[in-house]
Amino acid sequence: MADAFEEKAAWCALNTVFGFEPQTGHRLAEALEGPGAVFHLTVQERRQLLGPSKFLPQLSLRTLDEAAESLRRLQADGYRFVGYGEPEYPGLLRECEDPPLGLYIRSESPLPELFDAQPAVAVVGTRDISPYGKEWCQRIVMALARAAQKPRIVSGLALGTDGIAHQTALECGLPTIGVMATGIDRVYPFRHEALADTIARTPRSGLVTDYPPGTAPLAIHFIRRNRIIAGLCGATILVESKSKGGGMITARLAASYDRTVLALPGRIDDRRSAGCNHLIREQIAEPLTDLDRLAEQLGLGAGKPLRKRDLYQEVLDFYGASCPEEEVRRMAGVARLIQQNRGIALEEIARRAGISWPEAAAGAGILESDGFICMDLLGNCTIKPKNM
């Protein structure tokens, strides 16, 4: 019987060969009662099993030796690999029809704590996220943080929805997993390197991929990644998506795995909500319409209700002792306008409030610096959700 490292190396080699066709790798490992035997077949035996397959030259002892050497280098660099046949392999992912043959992992936590210690919820969506989507992505994760049974947030480490979901989870004290479309030794997009480092160091959080080290972020790799996001989770929430996109693929995969799928409804004329509205219309996803019910809807126990915010009074109380009354009331009025008109521009704030543009800009700038609002480069303003 092969020892643990040899078995792990065999799964690693099998994953390298059949990464895009894992079901073929699984059938071979099952037929031969283990992955290691696949690489000890004679040329004739390989042909009998696979026929005229493009994979035949790769099913050799050389591939197995290269996988073993790669694992040794990974372990020396602090990375890990878990094969499908090992007990630490994620239980929910194992239930899928096309699970990866193995996973590369970057995390400081034991694997049982990373994968199966608590429920997992995928929060996914477009990179081109709107102010509406950003606000509700944050609110959704905050609502999950109030659940009786705290979930792990899983997403794809991409710009837009993914990054917001990961960052909000970290800020709320929820563990999070970033599923990568590259090798475990690379981070894409590059601007998320700091976020990826934080995730890897956070307890019960980590980075995961089934791509071998050195794999570049090609477009086709993101499609393969999406099945892992869906497969790791009991539920998937689609925040915003065009009619086609990675978030839609992930949601449909989750539905095919018989997992819960929710979608945030949006305006019917907003292309970034077209995918969500379509999934709801086709009854593939349930509409997400009540954050106070979200945790219970996902089987996480009744969540703590969110106290309704009186933002106008919050601003009055926050600045009342340090600023002139007229200035405080002007800032409170600006805050209320932003709360009622998501994405409102500074020019529109000035017009509606009956103040000058410099006064609107000054008030918005102070509110942003103190965490009440967010303002983009074009001067469009949105209330910053807070975990209350």
Image (cartoon, helix red, strand yellow):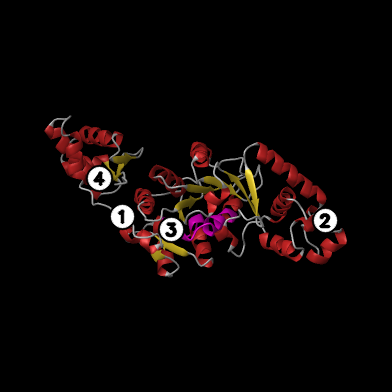
For marks 3 and 1 on the same chain, the one whose residue lies earlier in the sequence: 3
Q: Which residue is mark 4?
A: 338
Residue at 50% across / 58% down in the picture?
A: 233
**Is residue 144 on the magenta stretch?**
no
Question: In the image, which is nearer the foreground, mark 2 or mark 1?
Answer: 1
Q: Which residue is mark 3?
A: 237
Give amino acid for label 1.
Answer: Lys
For marks 4 and 3 on the same chain, the one whose residue lies earlier in the sequence: 3
Question: In the image, which is nearer the foreground, mark 3 or mark 2?
Answer: 2
In the rendered view, does 287 fall on the left or right side of 153?
left
Q: Which residue is mark 2?
A: 40
Q: Are marks 4 and 2 in contact (CB under 8 Å)?
A: no
Question: In the image, which is nearer the foreground, mark 3 or mark 1?
Answer: 1
Q: Secondary structure at mark 2?
A: helix
Q: Which residue is mark 1?
A: 304
Give the residues drawn in magenta, as a range. 224-247
